[in-house]
Amino acid sequence: MSANKLARKARLLRWAMNLYPPYLGAGVRVRRISADFRQVQVKMGLGWYNRNYVGTQFGGSLYSMTDPFFMLMIMENLGRDFIVWDKAARIDFIAPGTGPVYADFSIDQGLLDDIRQHTADGDKYHPELHVAVRDGSGTLVARVHKTLYVRLKPRARQAA
């Protein structure tokens, strides 16, 4: 796919994610998706709709702001020959989120090469990825651990 088409796809996905009802309801905004789908920046404000009983960010909203991005980034970078699913997730709450919070996702070529190497023979692979959720001053609010399931599709295994 050409660079222009990828950039257009990234802009369209960002726009669609920002209109996605669960994200609208939680106050989640996708601020940026890089044209190569290797970086994503997400923000979530604090409002009556995502504030918990003690006045801080609701834990479910903190997790939801991070949920799909590693899977989407890996899918877009590996292409249609791969099955990519979220397999497991864990969130560690470190400090209360008392205002807007941010998550910056990043993947690199080394990770993609590692996935391709581990799945080349048709084996499944479970890469573990992490993202920090920070407040506006950089204080760590939560750490999210994601485990993905990645495998070559059967038709791609037969072609190799």
Image: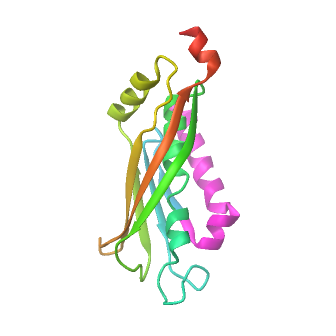
Reply yes or no: does residue 2 show up in magenta. Answer: no
Residue at 62 percent of width and 56 percent of height: 17
In-front residue for pair 125/4: 125
The x, y position of residue 50, in whole percent, is 57, 79
User: Can the viewer see residue 127?
Assistant: yes
In-front residue for pair 50/102: 50
In-front residue for pair 49/122: 122
Q: Is residue 115 above or below residue 132?
A: above
Q: Is residue 53 above or below residue 43?
A: below
Find the residue positioned furthest to the left.
Answer: 138
Q: Horizontal placement of 4 versus 12: left or right? A: left
Quadrant housing the N terminus: top right
Q: How many marks?
A: 0
Q: Horizontal placement of 140 versus 160: left or right? A: left
Residue at 60 percent of width and 72 percent of height: 26
Find the residue positioned furthest to the top.
Answer: 159
Q: Quadrant of residue 126?
A: top left
The x, y position of residue 157, in whole percent, is 57, 15
Reply yes or no: does residue 24 show up in magenta. Answer: yes
The x, y position of residue 46, in whole percent, is 50, 80
Q: Is residue 114 above or below residue 132?
A: above
Residue at 57 percent of width and 41 percent of height: 85
Residue at 54 percent of width and 28 percent of height: 151
The x, y position of residue 62, in whole percent, is 49, 69
Q: Is residue 48 above or below residue 80?
A: below
Main SS, magenta region, reads helix
User: Can the viewer see residue 1?
Assistant: no
Q: Which residues are magenta?
A: 3-29
